[in-house]
Image: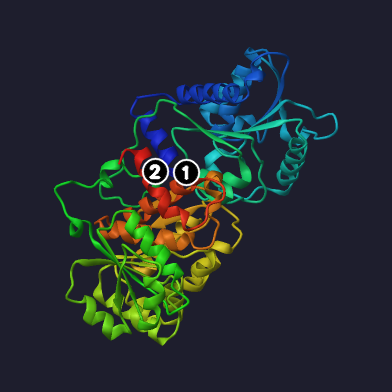
Amino acid sequence: MTELLTGAEMRAHESKAIESGQVTGLDLMERAGQGVVDAMFAQWPDMQAGDHSAIVLCGPGNNGGDGFVVARLLKEHGWRVQVFCLGAPENLPPDARRNFDRWTDLGPVVSIEELKIDQGFKPDLVVDALFGTGLTRAIDASLDLLFSKINAHAARGDTKILSVDIPSGVCADSGRVLGDSLRADLTVTFHGEKPGHLLTHGLLAHSEKVVVVDIGLPQFQRHTSDTNFILKNEPVTPYVLRKSGQRHKYDYGHAVVISGPAAHTGAARLAARGALRIGAGLVTVAARAQALPELAAHQTAVMLRQVEGGADLKVQFADDARANAFCAGPALGADDVAAELLGAVLALERATVLDADALTLLAERPKLFTALHTSCVLTPHGGEFVRLFPEIEEKFATPPTRGPAYSKVDATRDAARKAGCVVLFKGPDTVIAGPDGRCVINPPDDSAAWLATAGSGDVLAGFICGLLARGLPPLLAAAAGTALHNECARSFGPGLIAEDLPEALPGVFRQMGV
């Protein structure tokens, strides 16, 4: 997985590299500007030849300095370039001021207040180098209006918008908008993606594409005791999922899925199939007697166990240490018997995935919530998150007025700390956090859009349960299960239904080299 740096971490990393003498600020600014131009020509090759015009919007900080470099390089490439600056040039940071002066040898700099967006506004490109990752205040009304006009003009197809680091108005740590923002066709960022590029608010709404440019910074070194980091989710390495010919089925764990009553077993069956396909050595569905015939008619490799209530479940599994991972919630129900079953599962204190009805029970019955332990994984979607963590959701739903804004990462971390276990907050962007602050972002992916189908979440719960049974720790099991879930959807393509997800796994494993 790739580590994501917040805006503050990125600035501190740059400062440390400059202070150590490894690089100068001017070097970084020149490389950034060149990287922007190279990425632009790679994205739009037709812009390398012919007569083209650009308007470059430069802000009051080092992002503006990058913009002056871009303006100079485009001018040297034969473009007609106009530069507009926000704020007084004498207030620019030293390196940005040096590049301001270099540009003024080639052309004027005009105050951004004099930029007119009218029928005569027809640049091929608008370069947005206003705020970047350092934005901490809301965009004022005059800039809101300017952004709105530029967006409207670009939407007609006359002009491309390229943002330096992140579209101005978007918080780099959260992807949330502080007022209004420009909507970029291309965003070029440096060293690595930021959290705001991967969260739904930022990527989908404000930039069509994000490109990362290497500007020669050393690898970021985090203190070994610091667990408060954010990773971009990626498929696990194949060796984590491989099986050895020297081992037997119990070495890969025994996953137990708790079923709901008769006529409500489908979700449990989907979860069980997912756990089996992902490699759990054995999978059992535990159900009340009335549901067993229905389950038996649909299951072959999955075993069945009659469990009538919480006391019965304890008798069945308390002394069976080989049953090492449980999944409770898919179509479990929310009655007293379901609550007893959930309480008994939690009392075992084994690796446990809680989804759907189990989350409703946790929200409605505080004693069950207090029984959560560090081996649990909660998998709420947005509505379930509201019921479980209403005060956190209220904070997340409040429109931000300054940055760094409260993000889905913050909300998931706070939920994990409150629950004392891993929380997987589902959505187009899925965020997974542990109570120690470790966090993984699974970004939106249009190629996996067919996951928006009934039952896909039940399969995800089964994937995670199967990985827990195989011995993966909760955070890694949740992240790997989510990545494999997405890979199955991408592999199968349009027409996907939940039943297809487990059956797509063998092909995904082969592609991965498992």
Any part of residue 420 in sight? yes
| Marked residue nearer the N-terminal end (1 or 2) | 1
Q: Nearer the viewer, residue 510 or 423?
A: 510
Q: Quadrant of residue 182?
A: top right
Is 103 above or below relative to 374? Answer: above
Q: Is residue 411 visible?
A: no
Would you say 284 lies left or right of 81 here?
left
> What amino acid is at disc 1?
Ser
In terms of secondary structure, where does tag 2 sit? helix
Q: Position of residue 224 (x, y in %)?
A: 25, 46
Residue 507 tag number: 2
Q: Residue at x 66, y 19 (%)?
A: 46
Q: Is residue 276 left or right of residue 95?
A: left
Q: Indicate left or right for 152 with 314 as reference.
A: right
What kind of residue is marked 2?
A: Gly
Q: Quadrant of residue 39?
A: top right
Q: Position of residue 169 (x, y in %)?
A: 62, 45
Q: What residue did someone put label 1 on? A: 491
Residues at marks 1 and 2 touching, judged by CB atoms closer than 8 Å: yes
Task: Name the residue: 64% across, 37% down.
Answer: 184
Distance between the Cα atoms at labels 1 and 2? 8 Å
Q: Quadrant of the N terminus?
A: top left
Q: Residues within 10 Å of mark 2 (few under 14, many from 20)?
A: some
Examine the rendered structure and indicate whether residue 277 appears above or below residue 107: below
Residue 225 in the image, given as x and y percentages of width and height: 26, 50
